[in-house]
Amino acid sequence: MEKYKQIDQSVVILNNDLGQKRLIAYYVSHEECNVSERKILSYMQKQLPDYMIPSVFIALETLPLTSIGKVNRKALFGLKNNKLKREKDCKLARNQIEFQLQRIWEALLGREKIGMKDDFFALGGHSLLAVHLISKVNKTFNVHYPVSWAFMQNTIEKQANKIRHQNTRVMYEPLLTFNEGGSKTPLFLIHPGHGGAEAYIELANLFKKDQPLYAVESQDIYSKEPSSKNIETLAAKYVQHIQAVRPQGPYCLGGWSLGGLIAYEVAQQLSAQNQTVQTIYLLDTFLLSGEERKQHLLVSQVINELLKKNPSHLQLPLRYRKRIEKVGKLQAQMMAKYKTDPYPGRVFLFKAKRKWAISEVFAFDQNALLQNYMDTMFLKGNNGWTQCVAHLEVQLIDGDHQSIMKGKNLRQISTLLQEDIAKYSSLTYRESHCELG
Amino acid sequence: MAKINHAPILKNMDSQFTNESRGSATFPLNNDFIHVWAVHCSVMQKQIPLFSEFLSEEEKIRLDNFKFSLLKKHFIIRRGILRLILGNYLEKDPGEIKFSYDQQGKPYLKDNKQFRKKSKTICFNLTFSHDVILYAFTLQDKIGIDIEYVQDQLIHGGVEEQFFSLAELTQFNKTCGKQRARSFFQAWTRKEAIAKTIGKGLLFPLEKIEVTLGHYPRALKIKEDEEIAKNWKLYNIDQLNGYVGTIATEGMKKKLKFITIRQELLSQLLKLEI
């Protein structure tokens, strides 16, 4: 490490703090500005095998010395650094590529719950499996990596980053497949407003593999000129994408926020084809009255600002994130126009129990508008669905419109959702068989 | 730490191996031989606590990277036995052996002049698959070894296209049944053993190492070069039921001595002082 020109002195020690042995490098540099730890890292990676590379770098002004002038290792151990805590095991996929890679790795290694930072070879991967991995990666992502790639990119995180950069033009995939197998009724989630299907990655992580799960991606975010005019035509396209993988019902449909409204229209169109729609799952979707829709048009831009902070958005390439604003406006217009017909089937609403807490600071008039809108939404019984839906079930979730899609709230939704689909799957199956008989 | 008796016990053990050795029975390592040591992990479980005492700090860190206890155990056995064998060649305690690592993480002896006779360097390489670990030792020449447990389920999805040359693919597509699986693993281990000898492992493009697919092991072309390929000596390892393997060296042809470490031999290797 000291061979690196910006580093004057360094000590590497073995730390066993959080139940995990790790190498920590303490260094002193003469450079005034920050030394790039990434550069040191890549320099060391050229010289040393992976497991000899420190996982944490800590810069010091001087190395602590003992009375006889040796490095005081005890004192080094005492230097607490929050970097240590940050190094947590990251088990969940954060985007579609990581999700797909995780599934490939799990199938190859015959193990569950592989973390994003786990080393393929420390999980029992051997060279022939690495060849299989490459073969599968090349096919899945339409790339042409040599076998050596798996040795350089030995974690899911590294591989996903490389693949993402390879596909600088991230292709528009109309339908994301999370789980294919299993005999239960498949669930199709429609992307929410102000974003894409990446909003469902965290939920997909929580789903069992025997529950088929797909997400319909936003066509407008991925097209140069977002052009959707109304929810009906958009839903008609989405019906095609859904039927491309599952030509026949029964179907479960669902979506968060605007996604639920589009799912509602998709369900109407599938029912018109005489297909069985088992249940529509609305994740805090609102059915707005005429007056409320006008209000929504006014606040949609402010809502956009709020939703931008959603961590799943940050997984999107920048140019798509930039487009979200325009798409959000378009969606507000579509929503204002949408004529909601009554629906005879079963609808399950997950309603956020809490009022959407606004931490951002907006201009005074914007703020007043927003507060007013939030109050209206919050007070809306059953989010406005009672008059349109014959069989409505409501489950309150402890969170606001955004926080229901995270953490323990989302885990609750995931459990209830899967139980409900499973329960009704057998019923739907029996019914369709009775009809045939 | 367990103390090991330094007597070079291997010298007097020829009778133990005559039924197993493929060459004449000389011991210890000399210029004419490649020693191949075989271990079944399943019979070494009891020795794990002892073997873990041999490990260096570096090896303990590496051990910690393995997420599952089975993999941890295998690693301890791999390194424990490696230290034990080297300890006997070098007349040292297993725990005293110091390794250096190349960029690919392949271990070599830090002070290679440790070998007491003729200041020759010991070269070695190891491989494992399923329940078996194999070690190859030789003097002077670099060496690579690879073993694979033959499993049909590893031959699917056109995986051969990732590392077979066109000529090899044509030949491979003519095989079927049991012969197909055998050809696949023979070719794979030949390529892998050569790549490991070169020292790049799978960073070397395997389709550029062309080998025979049949029983007779030979390198045909290395990066299109037939002359260079002629320098390579390949040896089949077919002593282990259900496994296929290859040893590769560059240089003169040597005899192979195959040694299985069973309980009896292990306790002699260990010769613990109480």
Image: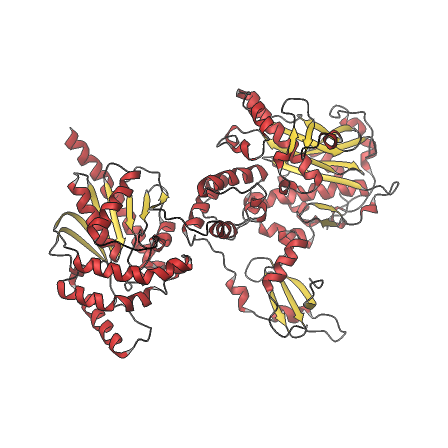
Q: Name the residue at 57% across, 21% down.
A: B179
Side of B12 relative to A206 (left or right): right
Location of residue B167 with respect to A430 vertically, above or below: above
Q: Is residue A407 visible?
A: yes
Side of B121 relative to B242 (left or right): right
Q: In this orientation, which residue lies closer to the viewer: A336 or B234? A: A336
Side of A133 relative to A348 (left or right): right
Residue extending farthest bottom: A364
Q: In this orientation, which residue lies closer to the viewer: A362 or B260? A: A362
Q: How is the image coloured?
A: secondary structure
Location of residue A30 with respect to B270 vertically, above or below: below
- Residue A99 in picture, x, y percent from top left: 42, 48
- Residue A336 in picture, x, y percent from top left: 18, 60
Q: Is residue A110 visible?
A: no
Question: Where's the N terminus of chain A, which quadrant?
Answer: bottom right
Q: In this orientation, which residue lies closer to the viewer: A390 or B10? A: A390
Q: Name the residue at 54% across, 43% down.
A: A145
Q: Quadrant of residue A403?
A: bottom left
Q: Quadrant of residue A224?
A: bottom left
Q: Name the residue at 58% across, 48% down.
A: A152
- Residue A381 in picture, x, y percent from top left: 16, 62
